[in-house]
Amino acid sequence: MANHGDNERLRQLDEKIARAKGGDDKSGSMASDKYSQANTAWRMVTELVAGIVLGLGIGLGLDALLGTKPIMLVLFILLGFVAGVRVMMRTAADIQKKQVAEAAKDERD
């Protein structure tokens, strides 16, 4: 079992860690902001690729059923691309709204 001396040392260590984290707040914020931007970029790429892959699958399936080899494939790949771009634009607009709201909140404070 831990004695009183060990508990005191652990408490002091916790305080040192908290001070170190508090003093280095800006660099931690910048690092988390970079990760947030990278996550957003990957999200947008994934949305675009998902639209194209979905269009590819539907186009291939319809071409196999209807016997119209390249027509449905090309049509649905283009539709998937357009849908992916629309979703990306909607995501970008949502992110921009959040950033504007945060900037307005920071100005008020």
Image: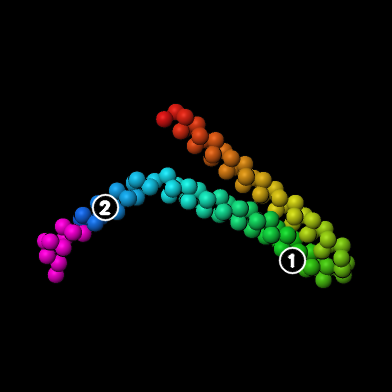
x then y, percent, for residue 67: 87, 70
In the picture, the quarter occupied by the C terminus is top left
Quadrant hosting residue 89: top right
Which residue is disc 2 drawn over? Answer: 16
Q: Which residues are magenta?
A: 1-10
Magenta stretch encompasses residue 6: yes
Looking at the image, can residue 28 be seen?
A: yes
Q: Is residue 69 above or below residue 107?
A: below
Q: Earlier in the sequence, mark 1 or mark 2?
A: 2
Q: Secondary structure at mark 1?
A: helix
x then y, percent, for residue 94: 59, 43
Given contact means CB atoms under 8 Å apart, are the residues at marks 1 and 2 in contact?
no
Return the residue nearer the eye: 1 or 93: 1
Looking at the image, can residue 58 be seen?
A: no
Q: What amino acid is at disc 2?
A: Lys
Which residue is disc 1 drawn over? Answer: 57
